[in-house]
Image (cartoon, helix red, strand yellow):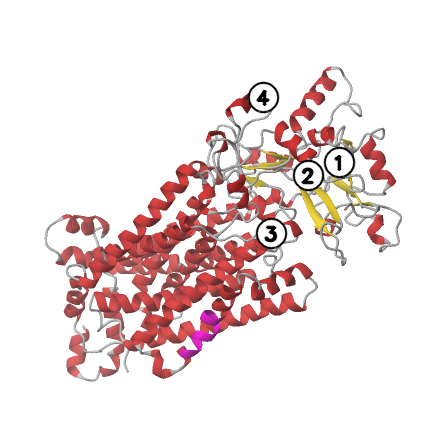
Amino acid sequence: MSVGTLLENWSEFRHFHPVDDKPHDPYKWAMSIDLDTCTGCNACSVACYAENNIPVVGKEKFQHGQQMHWMRIERYWSEDDREFPDQGAQFLPMMCQQCEAAPCETVCPVGATNHTADGLNSQIYNRCIGSRYCSANCPFKVRYFNWYDYPTVDNVWPAEMTRQLNPDVSVRGKGVMEKCTFCVQRLRAVEVTAKSEGRIVREGEVQTACQQACPSSAISFGNLVDPESRVHKQWAAQQVVLEADEQEKNKEHGTSELRGYRILEELRPYPSVMYLEQVRESAV
Amino acid sequence: MKDIREDIAWAKINKDVLVSLENPRKMYWVIVFSALALFSVGVGCEVYQYNVGMGVANLNNPNVWGLYIATFIFWIGMSHSGTLLSAILHLMHADWRKPIYRFAEAMTTFSLMTAGLFVMVHIGRLWQFYYAFPYPSERWVWPNFQSPLLWDAMAIFTYLSSSVLFLYVGMIPDLAICRDNLHEGWRKKLYTFLALGWEGTDRQWRNFRITYLTIACFLIPLAVSVHSIVASDFAMSQQPGWHVTSFPPYFVAGALYSGCAAIITLFIILRYVFKFEDYMTKSILKKTVRLTFAIAMVWTYLNAVEFAAVWYGHDVDAKQVLIQKATGPFAPFWWGMIFCGSVLPLILAFKRFQTNIPVLFAVSLLLNLGMWLERWMIVAPTFSHGYYPWVWDNDQWPSLVQWGMVMGSFGWFTLLFMIFCKVFPSVSMYEVKEMVYHRSLHLKKDETAEQGAH
């Protein structure tokens, strides 16, 4: 453990974002979510709970705000004169935006959250000491802390359901931070298979759990640097650029035909999730 | 009104201070046992939280920081006046500090120890807190040097070790006096060991002066940097209400402020409990009060600067947070902070109150309440009114476990402090002698004073 090692590792560990010294090659996982087709059914959220062994904290802890939904459906009411139930609602699925210049990464005292070469914002549970600084600095507030030791708490996973836990995903103990991983276990599996076959992952070879569960196909997910991928085509059609801090849609001040935007872009976290603005009349 | 009586004999100084190690007033034991009880409450809360999980503190997502961080800043702030009194005023040759700097330094050390505890109780996996240090690891894993929390860990440990050293070095001549005057027993052994064979030779005094001055000079930038770094925890983040350039000086001013108020509180307690009326005189109290008033105004000014910068700036989100502080669920506490921190100290400007001990005792406690509220109002509102609308309707109220630990920290601090004052001389004997000597120099022509001085 020398200072030389430190400096060498350091240059690997941190570099300017968005990355120009290290291009995303061959993968940059990204997502796009069409708010026009989202019906707010919560299937994505349920699928996420099942896939990622997320503890179901129960009514009481939920009321204390200690819920763990990596994928949450936010509900915004239209501000018109109509009363509920005629009042329109808009839904927005929100999960970790896998920012390229993630505010959470720089503040972690132990380096438990880092950027991977394929553009994910990773969380190392074993390294996390639970200072919760990452959550404090996350503009989207999509990080969830294990307030209790959920694997030992009653009824988090009822006895008859313990067999449904996903063996590919670790179960988190108390005192660590967790968040959406873009289903990294699935990504790693296909990446390894593809590598062993001497190719890169093909479009459609991998889906995230939320994407798989979405009945209206509002979520698309894939490799942004692969010109054949649906995500790449969607981002390109909307002229949304990963390393830009303002997109075409916003530059045109409301007159644009474009629908693609990223949330809180002005803070320059360079998120990997593009949202497509809702254009239809609000769902009732 | 004089800072100290000029005709006070050196032997009497020794005797008066040494007696504080033997028989304080009954009030001493009342304070020690109340502190112990309070501390036990805190320990109970921590044991419960450790076993059940952080959730019992009623923190939630996204309100992940609560009273622990607020109280942590409070105690770090408290630690600053010791350095102010002993190091800065030492360099400025303000000799009125001499009878009171020892306990102020002890306050520095113990409040740092208390602050350190809050880092421990705050983190989710207490048993792995050492990950935050760059310790040699066979896995070659380093902490993240970009994180202000890591700077914090380093700054606090450096400051703590330096201030312990400063406190100890400054005490060596006094420890020798204790060694020479006390009867046999464990204390005598302790003082003999700690006095390092001090005999008061010229050479020893010369080395002592140089060492003391060197540490004092080392400590001042350290004290400023520690609280600036704590401020960086907030200022370096991206959140509205925290992302403020003026935070480091604002935090340092707040730190000196709460520390000075605490010095007044402890001054009054020690003066009574250990019968130090001859040394902790009202004149010195008055000077401390004036210093506190000046710092209170600096703090008020920096507060106004921050509000104005936010109000007239273009950061809409920061402005929303400020409006929410003044009108939202935190409004009573926020206005309480303004009242205790900026309005209440105005009475310190009146000469009538500058030596009125009951009034000063109450005011100094309220000033620190205000400063504690200030820290809470820095931490909490940003979480309930950040950038993202989803967090806006979150209303988080700290549970009794959090309050218990905050109370416990006051018990822990008082306990350490009172034990220190009973075991070690809390008034610096040799410096008071110096002070008396210098004050009596103008009587030099008087033969008797001449003899008395030597």
Question: Which residue is nearer to you in this view: A108 or B327?
Answer: B327
Same subunit: marks 3 and 2: no
State the image coordinates of residue A118 (x, y, percent, origin top left). 71, 31
Q: Amino acid at mark 4?
A: Pro
SS assignment at label 1: strand
Please give the residue where the numbered disc 4 appears in the rendered image.
A167
Q: Which residue is mark 2?
A: A98
Please, which residue is most extreme toward the top here? Answer: A197
Q: Residue at x 78, y 34 (%)?
A: A216
Chain-order first, disc 4 or disc 1: 1
What amino acid is at disc 1?
Met
Dot 2 or dot 4, earlier in sequence: 2
Number of the label disc, if any, that sits on residue B90: none
Q: Is residue A194 left or right of residue B377?
A: right
Provide the secondary structure element on which disc 2 rests.
loop
Above or below, B15 against B183 in this view is below
Q: Amino acid under label 3?
A: Ser
Q: Position of residue B8 (x, y in %)?
A: 18, 75
